[in-house]
Amino acid sequence: MEESRGGFFLEKFIVTLKRVLLEPLKFFENLQPGGPYSKPLAYACLVELSMAAISAVIWGGIFAGFILGGHSHLGVLGAKLHILSLFIGLLILVISIFGASFAYYIGALICGARSDYRAIFRMYAYTESAVIFRLIPLIGGVVAEIYRGVLLYFGFKAVSRLGSLQAFLCAVAPGLILLSLIAICGFSFYQYLWK
């Protein structure tokens, strides 16, 4: 969507997805740092919606067919709830992209980056492409987050003009800080319960 100028919407989406996933450094080098917020944000939402639709078909079919034993009235209720959860999920996605971009922007400034918030936002929104790996059974979520880290690394190298070590630190530091905070909160909660 960013680089593809001609063609149909779906074709642009697929070309962008392939370029981000298969040629991340080249894609991020060609990313216009001063472009609009709307295109990368729309792209991220479309990637998430696509994954949600595919998941709904796969898991909805499994849930309705095997667990419910074909009770169609429960399938309709489930579909309505799934649509509602999609809209709530998109709202949370938009807020989280702005928030995560800000956190990565602060990290990039600490590492000496030469880019503004808009550039980091645009780069981060395109890293949403990694969610396609969630389709891998059992380990998809882990693979998706690891590959998002790879995309962030190449994004920081290209967009912020950082060296390899600085780009690596910018890509992994927020995740490590978040995991540390979760572990500290979990340990504190455990200690509180067993006092």
Image (cartoon, grey):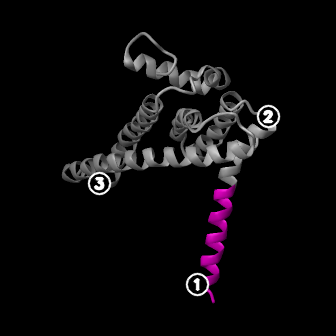
2 vs 3, front mark: 2
| Inter-mark Cα distance, 3 to 1 | 37 Å
Task: Give SS at disc 3.
Answer: loop
- The amino acid on which the numbered mark 3 sits, given as a three-letter code, is Leu
The residue at which mark 1 appears reads as: 193
The residue at which mark 3 appears reads as: 68
**Magenta includes 150?**
no
Segment tinted magenta in the rendering: 177-195
Q: Earlier in the sequence, mark 3 or mark 1?
A: 3
Closer-to-camera residue (31/180): 31
| Inter-mark Cα distance, 2 to 1 | 43 Å
| Inter-mark Cα distance, 2 to 3 | 51 Å
Closer-to-camera residue (30/80): 30
Task: Give SS at disc 1.
Answer: helix
- Residue 134 point in image, percent of width and height: 53, 41
Pointers 2 and 1 in contact (CB under 8 A)?
no
- Residue 35 point in image, percent of width and height: 50, 26
Q: Residue furthest top?
A: 6
Question: Which quadrant of the figure has residue 25?
Answer: top right
- The amino acid on which the numbered mark 1 sits, given as a three-letter code, is Leu
- Residue 158 point in image, percent of width and height: 69, 27
3 vs 1, front mark: 1
